[in-house]
Image (cartoon, rainbow, N blue to C red):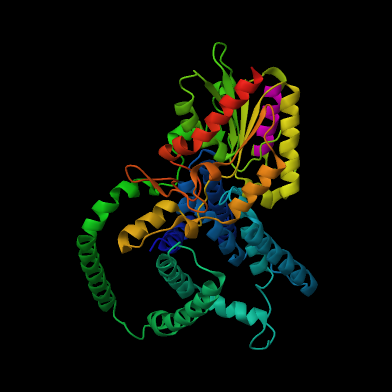
Amino acid sequence: MLHTWSLSVEEQFYLVLPVLIWLLLRRRLPMVRQDATLLFGLGGASVASFALCHWLMTTGRVEAAFFLSPPRAWEFLAGGLISLRGIPALANIHFKRVICVVGLAMIVVPAVGYRDGSFFPGVGALLPCTGAVLFIWSGVTGSAPLRAVCSPLNVAGFIGRISYSLYLWHWPLFLYLRFSQPDLTVSTYQKVLLFAATIAIAYASYCFVEQPFRQRRWIVARQAVFVAAGCTSAVLLLVSAIGFSLSRPLQEAANPLHVYQDSSYPDWYRAGSCFFYRWEDFRDQACLEPALDRPNVLLWGDSLAAQYIHGLNQHLAAEGTHLLQANGAACLATIEVLSDWNERCRNLQKRIGAFFAENRPDAVVIAGKWDMHVEKVGFDEMIAILLRNISMLKSLSIPVVVVGPSPTFRSRLPAMLLRAEATGVELRSDILMVRGLFDLDRRMKESIPSSPGVEYVSILDAVCDGLRCPLILEGKVPLTFDRVHVTADGSVLISAPVASAIRNVWRIRS
């Protein structure tokens, strides 16, 4: 029922809005017209809501900005403002068409172009919401022309009419199908079939549940509404209590795995200080301050570089190694400032360039989510950037270790392990792994061969047996806490070959 949070935010808005309108009209100045009062009052509330959303996003409270009603109210209000008399209607048909096309484009571009880190629902929501406002505005006046039954706009209108039922039903159906799969993933073919089934169920729900309630065909009297709601709530509570009691043994067995369901980075990743993953910069200057009396190793790259910090600290403790860390989420390790990357990554690139201008660490470890970087810049360009990094470091007489891809799963590993615990299914890593990583690892190994002062480390060769990689470690600890980022025990495991490579380049250097 996770998806119903969105419906609850919508219903909360509908409860508060009439009270807000009543207060505005009751307290308005006699010389100010009603439409002007509503326009400025609701417009001010929309601006305040957006400001709250932006503040929550920029201060690291992303969950609050996303799930709570007040920071999302501006999106509803933006559409509602169009209905006020103070907003002029569009009269020119050609201008209306231009506004319509612009609005649709502003909706479609974010729908297909936004990725993780798009600062949504803050400033990232401005584009699609403004597009929706323009689209509505373009059709406020005038009658709609007659269209064929299967015309795109009629199809869109049909989807719009059943959208509440469609949204209500789609998530449980897709979730149960996903849960029935060994690797918790759904194929494109299955998605198409399930989407068609969801449309059919949603239409039936619209006709036989939603419309009768709207038209009061089933329940007419107010008292009957409360009786029906009470009976339904009682049945739900009873079913929930039975399910809870039956699931207790499974819960106890699954508790060791359940603690890894939290998708946030553990403290030892040093997220928000030496590893920045939202829009902040380095908060701790000590991240790049070399120790004067100990060997210094720089860990450089994205979140998959940060995952080695714990394990390397464990393996290199005997050498008294001091680990420096410069990590940015989804940022390719490069000394070049790349204009087509986001500001967070450009800041990291500038910072690392300033670091090498003044410092000479004893070794540099470069790691990253290489399949993601290949998707963004292409394999050849990624390798070219890495080779330029290596050439620069060799010119400074700094040994370098390049770490290949680490085990990545098709879905969240703890969730797959919990499912196996619940159903008694034996999971095989060769089914759950992202297969393309092994080919990518081979190509990287061929393109960056080990040489004096340069080591390429294949994590997949070191910890996996062919396509079989460890899923769960001693003490029922999963290798990763999501699809790819390792747990503390996982970090110790995959860092062992990296620590050996660091010792090798030190030995060659000395």
* The C terminus, quarter of image: top right
Q: Which residues are magenta?
A: 345-356
The residue drawn where x is 59% and y is 67% is: 83
Image position, residue 292 (x, y; %): 57, 11
Left or right relative to 76: residue 145 = right
Image position, residue 132 (x, y; %): 63, 64
Left or right relative to 240: residue 150 = right
Which residue is most to the right? Answer: 94
Image position, residue 42 (x, y; %): 54, 55
**Above or below for 11 versus 221:** above
- In this rendering, the count of numbered labels is 0
Residue 145 makes an appearance in the image: yes
**Above or below for 31 versus 446:** below
The residue drawn where x is 66% and y is 79% is: 152
The residue drawn where x is 56% and y is 25% is: 503
Which residue is most to the top? Answer: 293
**Above or below for 461 versus 141:** above
Residue nearest the observer in this picture, 424 or 187: 424
Residue 31 makes an appearance in the image: no
**Above or below for 357 versus 336:** above
Determine if the magenta segment contains residue 352.
yes
Image position, residue 505 (x, y; %): 62, 25
What's the magenta bit mostly, secondary-structure-wise?
helix
* The N terminus, quarter of image: bottom left
Determine if the magenta segment contains residue 16.
no
